[in-house]
Amino acid sequence: MGQTELADEPISGFGKIRENIHNLRERIRELCKKSKEPRRPEDIRIVAVSKGHPGPAVRAAVAAGIGDIGENRVQEA
């Protein structure tokens, strides 16, 4: 399944992920414009952290354009 197919696939319970990422990018654009030191929004890297979220949520983030995803789990002793 390609990224385009994922983007159009309704992912139950994760529909707000695309909207949240869009809103985050808009906020970054606004802050770059207001910054005392000029910055370009494309120079800002968004790194999502899955923290054990299910695969469909991670796939929704990837479909919305997130390319950097980290995982944080407690190490078993």
Image: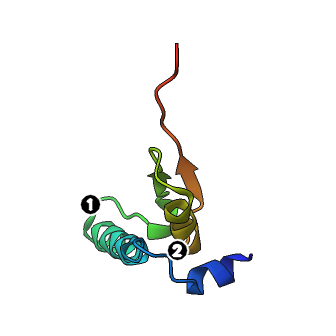
The residue positioned farthest toward the right in the image shown: 1
Which residue is found at the position 44% from the left and 68% from the top? 41
Q: Are marks 1 and 2 in contact (CB under 8 Å)?
A: no
In this image, 17 relative to 64: left or right?
left
x, y percentage for residue 15? 41, 77
x, y percentage for residue 72? 48, 37
Which residue is found at the position 58% from the left and 73% from the top? 63
* Sequence order check, earlier mark of 1 and 2: 1
Query: Quick one: 50 or 34, which is closer to the camera?
Result: 50
Residue 48 vs 51, above or below: the answer is below
Which disc, if any, is residue 24? none
Query: Quick one: 50 or 77, which is closer to the camera?
Result: 77
Q: Amino acid at mark 2?
A: Ala
Q: Residues within 10 Å of mark 1 (few under 14, many from 20)?
A: few
- Coloring basis for residues: rainbow
Which residue is found at the position 28% from the left and 67% from the top? 31
Q: CA distance from mark 1 to mark 2?
A: 30 Å
Secondary-structure class at tag 1: loop
Residue position marked by numbered label 2 in the rendering: 64
Q: Residues within 10 Å of mark 2 (few under 14, many from 20)?
A: some
The quadrant of the image that shows the N terminus is bottom right
Residue position marked by numbered label 1 in the rendering: 36
x, y percentage for residue 37? 33, 59
**Of the residues tagged 1 and 2, which is closer to the observer?**
2
Query: Quick one: 56 or 66, which is closer to the camera?
Result: 56
Q: Amino acid at mark 1?
A: Lys
Residue 59 vs 68, above or below: the answer is below
